[in-house]
Structure formats: structure tokens, C-alpha cells
Image (cartoon, helix red, strand yellow):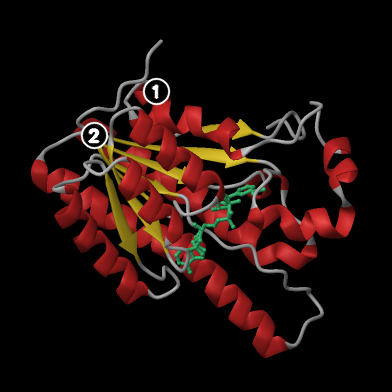
Amino acid sequence: MHIDLHGKKILVTGASRGIGKAIARHALLAGAKVGIHYAKSQQTALEFKEEFPHQAVPLQADLSLSGSVFRLFEESIEALDGLDVLINNAGVAIHSPLNGEDTQWLDHWHTTLNTNLLASCILSRKAVEYFLSQKQTGRIVHIASRAAFRGDTPDYLAYAASKGGMVALSHSLARAYGKQGIMSFVVAPGFTQTDMAQHFMQEYGEAHALKDIALNKLTQPEDIAPVVLLMAGGYLDHATGTTVHINAGSYAH
Ligand code: NAP
């Protein structure tokens, strides 16, 4: 099967590194026009712009600030000249021990919920409004986490809670708007070799990560991208409301 995304306008948040970068790259290769969103790392967006001058659109925004999230949506619509698919991928995993200092612990919760969950809620709300106003088909893909289903360690409670919120958001959107042609999906990666996973790798090492999974090789960002492309391209519409778990057999749900 050949995945063709020509004519599709896709916003990928957190497309500068890791999983988002792989999704954006494969979407560009499949012919889509892609909003390459980043917060601080501009490099990838510039490289994609050079390689795919008519398809890649760099977009900057700090998603921990709700005002910037609203601005990002407006800029995306303008720069992409519309929107067919929103991919809520950007995220943070902040190490925050349960016995940490109160104010700092609370700050970590706010940053995590604002970046991972509230930004996804705002962008989803704006996307639904837009799809309905245009009377068009629309698709939203939420990159959640195995942590939403399995739970995480006490050092990452906010992270797990934010990802659980994304799953509930996706279920609700899928139930509410399917008849109007809006689909909503979750992809739940397990441990994937990106910058986000560095802290774990440094503390426990690759051998420990490998022991947790059923395969011989750690999951790479490229292992996540194909399913997202199928969702974005409309090949999985009848799976709206569901989650695809990509965790190398470390956890079955
Ligand atoms: P990553 O390599 O750390 O990349 C994170 C991305 O999010 C970057 O593009 C970053 O932009 C962006 N971002 C971070 N903070 C932001 C902010 N305040 N505003 C806007 N953008 C921000 O992470 P990853 O591993 O690819 O993770 C991608 C998604 O997969 C996340 O939602 C993560 O929770 C989820 N996930 C990852 C794993 C894993 O093991 N890696 C497992 C399960 C789920 P800049 O580069 O500009 O900072």
C-alpha cells in the first residue's frame, strides 16, 4: 500500500526533534504540506524548509503559554492555507519527585499540564471549530503515552496524568464529532529513543530498557510515524476513538 498525503495540510507540534520530527519528515515525503512547529530548536524547521520549500512551513510557539497556543493555531491556518490534520505531539516529561519542595513540585505540574494537555485541548478545540466551519473532514492524532494506561513512577505523576487527559480528550472528540466527519485517535508509545528518554538511559542504561520490552531493539521515532500517517491519511477512519499502542510488547492493554 502506498500512503499518499498530497493535498493534505498537517500541523505537527514538536516537529523539531524525536517522534514529531519523524512524523513530519514522513508526512513531507508522502506529499503533505506540513506546519513544522518548534519551541526553541529552529534547526529542523529550517532544514525541512530547504529540502521541501513548497511543503514545509516553520512555526514557532511556546505551548506552555496558552496565548501562544491560540496564536500558533491562527498562524498555522494562514501559513498552510487551511488545515486537514492536527497532530498533538509536543510534550515534556519533567522529573519531579513526590518528596520535592511544594512550590517547585506544583510548578512542574502546571508546566506539564499546560504543555502536554491544555495546549492539546486548545488546538483540538480550534481545529474542531475550523473543520465544522469549513464543513470539511478533519483528523486529530494525539501522541499520548503508555504511561496513561500503565501508570508511571512517582517522579512522573504529572506526566502520566497529562497523558491520561489526552486519551479522555480524544475519546470525547471521537464520540462527539464522528458524524460530522471529524476523527480523533491516540497513539501511545512506550519507551522510544529520543532526547526525552535520555534521563532514563543515563540513569539505568540501554540494557535495562531492553529488558523491559519483548523485542531486541529499542523503539525508534521511525517506528511510530507509519501509524500516524495512516491515521492522518484517512486510512484508519473506522478506528476513530481508539488507541494504537506502540511499546515493543512491554505492556499489553
Ligand atoms: P523530545 O525528543 O524531547 O521532543 C519534544 C518536542 O516537544 C520538541 O519538538 C520540543 O520543541 C517540543 N516542546 C517541548 N516543550 C515545548 C513547549 N513548551 N512548547 C512547544 N513545544 C515544546 O520528545 P519525544 O520523545 O519525541 O516525544 C514526543 C511526544 O511523544 C511527547 O508528547 C512525549 O510525551 C511522547 N512520548 C515519548 C516517549 C519516549 O519514550 N520518548 C514515550 C511515550 C510518549 P523544541 O525542540 O523546540 O524544544
Q: Which residue is drawn at 77% across and 34% down?
A: 250
Which of the two labelled residues, at mark 2 and mark 1, occupies the earlier sequence position?
2
In this view, the mark in front (2 or 1): 2
Position in image of residue 1 (x %, y %): 41, 10
Q: In which quarter of the image is ligand 1?
A: bottom right
Indicate left or right for 151 with 87 as reference. Answer: right
Q: In the image, what residue type sits under mark 2? A: Lys
Say which mark, if any, is on residue 146: none
Q: In which quarter of the image is residue 229?
A: top left
Q: Residue at x 79, y 56 (%)?
A: 200
What is the spatial separation of the Cα atoms under label 2 and label 1, in whole angstroms? 15 Å
Element at badge 1? loop
Element at badge 2? loop
Furthest-top residue in view? 1
Residue 240 seen in render:
no
Please state, as top left, top right, bottom left or bottom right, where the C terminus lies in the image.
top right
Say which mark, if any, is on residue 236: 1
Q: In this view, does 252 lie above or below 120?
A: above
State the residue position of label 2. Answer: 8
| Crowd around label 1: few <14 · some 14–19 · many ≥20 (10 Å) | some
Please report contact status of discs 2 and 1: CB closer than 8 Å, yes or no.
no
Residue 23 seen in render:
yes
Q: Residue at x 27, y 67 (%)?
A: 70
Position in image of residue 104 (x %, y %): 67, 85
Q: In which quarter of the image is residue 53?
A: top left
Position in image of residue 4 (x %, y %): 31, 21
Indicate left or right for 1 with 54 as reference. Answer: right
| Crowd around label 2: few <14 · some 14–19 · many ≥20 (10 Å) | many
Q: Is residue 76 above or below residue 61?
A: above
Q: In the image, what residue type sits under mark 1? A: Leu
Nearer-the-camera pick, 104 or 48: 48
